[in-house]
Image: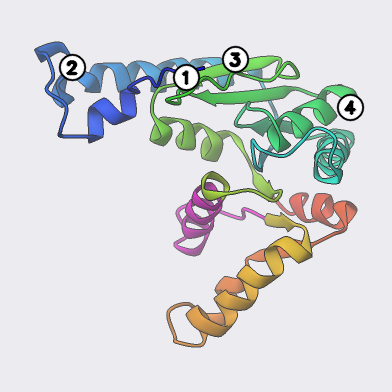
Amino acid sequence: MTIKRRITADQRLLDTRHNEEWKQKASWRVMKIQAEFVEGFDTLEAADLGDAIGVYGSARTPTDSEEYKLGIELGHKLGQAGFSVITGGGPGAMEAANRGAVDAGVKSVGLGIELPFEQGVNPYVDIQLDFHYFFVRKVMFLKYSCGFCALPGGFGTMDELFESLTLVQTEKVGKFPIALIGTDYWGGLVDWLRKSMMGDGKINPDDVDLLLVTDDLDEAVDHMKQAG
């Protein structure tokens, strides 16, 4: 079976190889980008999320895996602590965190993104937004979350993680706790940050300390309570 690959709005904006009609030119796309910001702000302001935690993680996490169970437990514990849960709305680890939030009776948000291949929003999202542009979606994550937990993930998780970390390091956001869940998965990365980046003077020792790496979900949730 051949899967049809769509050309996304991001690709039309960024890929200069595509010839565009006048309504698709970058200057006109500003209106579409503005509309996404307006819809995002209006929807999430009206949702009255209170304190919310953004949870990152892989869409490829199998539903029968221990990682998926960990995601459910994390979402549930965050909910029990009074946090709403915001994810990318996809399957895998994102679905697990949303599922745990629903089980805990708190607001479960999914910030979906248009991709070349259909992914869809998971069934445990009760507040849904769909974006064409990654950068608009990232602003929503950062504006409406007061901290982040990262479950094991791939490039997307790394992108979101390091953008959040950069904003904390440069003091573009205030106190903004970040927890990496899974010492086996994240430990090598943090070791590299200390040995290579810090060792070569590219970052300060305090920068690495911005990350909590843990297997203890209660410790991660307590760390999120430092927000504010």
On screen, residue 116 versus residue 147, left or right, reads left
Residue 141 at x, y percent in the picture: 55, 36
The residue under label 4 is which amino acid type? Ala
On screen, residue 104 versus residue 3, left or right, reads right
Asked if residue 170 lies in the magenta stretch, the reply is yes
Per the image, the residue denoted by label 4 is 104
Residue 67 at x, y percent in the picture: 81, 45
The residue closer to the viewer here, 16 or 108, is 16
Disc sitting over residue 24 in the figure: 2
Mark 2 falls on what kind of element?
A: helix
Say few, some or many: other residues with alpha carbon within 10 Å of mark 1 (under 14 / 14 to 19 / 20 or more): few
Which tag, 3 or 1, sits closer to the chain's start?
A: 1
- Camera-near label (4 vs 2) is 2
The image shows residue 13, relative to residue 28, as above or below, that is: below
Per the image, the residue denoted by label 1 is 3
Residue 133 at x, y percent in the picture: 38, 28
For the record, the magenta segment spans 158-177
The residue under label 3 is which amino acid type? Ala
Asked if residue 3 lies in the magenta stretch, the reply is no
The residue closer to the viewer here, 97 or 8, is 8
The image shows residue 146, relative to residue 7, as above or below, that is: below
Mark 3 falls on what kind of element?
A: helix
- Camera-near label (1 vs 4) is 1
Residue in the image at 37% along x and 19% along y: 6
- Distance CA(mark 2)–CA(mark 1): 25 Å
- Camera-near label (2 vs 3) is 2
The residue under label 1 is which amino acid type? Ile
Per the image, the residue denoted by label 3 is 46
The residue under label 2 is which amino acid type? Gln
- Farthest residue to the front: give it: 1
